[in-house]
Image: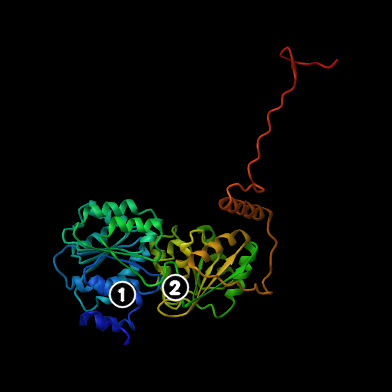
Amino acid sequence: MAAVTFSDLNLNKQLLKAIADAGYGQPTAIQQKAIPRILSGQDVMGIAQTGTGKTAAFVLPILMKVKYARGEDVRALILAPTKELVMQIEQVTRQLATYTDLRVVVLYGGVGPKNQIANLQQGVDILVATPGRFLELYRKGHIFTKYLKTLVLDEADRMMDMGFMPQIRSILEVIPVKRQNLLFSATMPDKVIRLSEEFLDFPEVIEVTPQATPAKTIQQAYYRAPNLKTKINLLEFLLKNDEFTRVIIFTRTRAAANDVFKFIERKNLGPANVLHANKGQNSRIAAIKAFKEGELRVLVTTDVSSRGIDVTGVSHVINFDVPVVYEDYVHRIGRTGRAELTGKAITLVNEAEEYHLHKIEKLIRQPIPERQRPAAVQVAPTSFAERQQMAKEIDHQKRLEDPGFKGAFHEKKKKPATHKRKVGGHKRKRR
């Protein structure tokens, strides 16, 4: 059977030329399955891991349906959970719309709305937005939805995790009922299924790989590290290897991200930068741009950015901490092995994190191989405070599995109060 090409998907000459300019080869599995169904007008629920080309899978048919600039008001709305993801979708959309006159406007928070309002006033065909900023400008009368025909929710699972359901419901109330709905997600937890039942009308479900399956181009492994200091020593050992050419390091907290970044800077293992929610919008944009253009070797970040960094050629992802939201593991490691390239994902695991690692293995339905910790890595002693904290976490994990479990830190019953014997309401005096 002949391989499917983009020409086989009934796309026009302008789009085929833009696809060729962008260097796309054959359409990916999600593109092959989603594009014809979207073009036919069906509601679609697409489940595909990151790095599989799902953005183009919904952008290309939208460009075909909208065709050319017309009027002043939006006809296709793409909602995404973060500013970084909005910018990523904008980049793909503009690239594929190069040979059209379509007007693409982006809306996101963290910056003043003045320029975004000016862009809306010049006319818009395709609007890419975060839910909050869309509602803000709609309520102020800057967005009109009468001609809206297509609505896309991208990264729907992340939308749910970030608490956007109230905003999404508000948006559904102010856009036309008669429209095509598209929902894309890397995983399909129960909350996304409930959203799809509320949002989609007899959808065509497209699942190109079992949900929460990492791309086959990613080689996974983990190292045991008994404490924070040993993790730092192991990280230093890894970054001294020249194979680590473009690296994203994920931490669970902003404080840990800052500490790891400072360590890398101090040891001259960069150039590096740090990215998290406390950083201003301009500095976040600058960090991603520098990383994308190869000016940075290392980007340290929290999970807030795991779905907004679309950079090909990331050689390694390092999970400095094991994520406790297990779907985030798939999104983290999906930053490497993109666009059919190979990549490596390494996770550093202490004793208290082994529980989460096993849960992740169950989610992705495959074991993560253990690598022997290099002998050159110094194993530091575990501080009393860190040892106590890990023991409490392990106790908590065991209670989750067995509610009757009583560990070292279970609450002890209070002893009944003892009172000195009184005679006649007074303490007995010694004679």
Q: Residue at x 48, y 67 (%)?
A: 364
Of callouts 2 and 1, which one flags the residue occurring earlier in the amino acid sequence? 1
When the figure is inspected, residue 174 is found, relative to residue 10, above or below; the finding is above
Q: Is residue 372 visible?
A: yes
User: Residue 104 at x, y = what percent?
Assistant: 24, 68
Q: Quadrant of the N terminus?
A: bottom left
Left or right position of 142 against 381 = left
* Residue 33: image tag: 1
For marks 2 and 1, give the one nearer the viewer.
1
Indicate the secondary structure of the residue bearing disc 1. helix
The foreground one among 221 and 98 is 221
User: Residue 323 at x, y = what percent?
Assistant: 51, 61
The image quadrant that residue 203 belongs to is bottom left
Indicate the secondary structure of the residue bearing disc 2. helix
Which residue is label 2 attached to?
291
Say what amino acid the circle numbered 2 marks.
Phe
User: Residue 417 at x, y = what percent?
Assistant: 68, 28
Say what amino acid the circle numbered 1 marks.
Lys
Left or right position of 157 against 67 = right
The foreground one among 413 and 319 is 413
CA–CA distance in space, label 2 to label 1: 32 Å
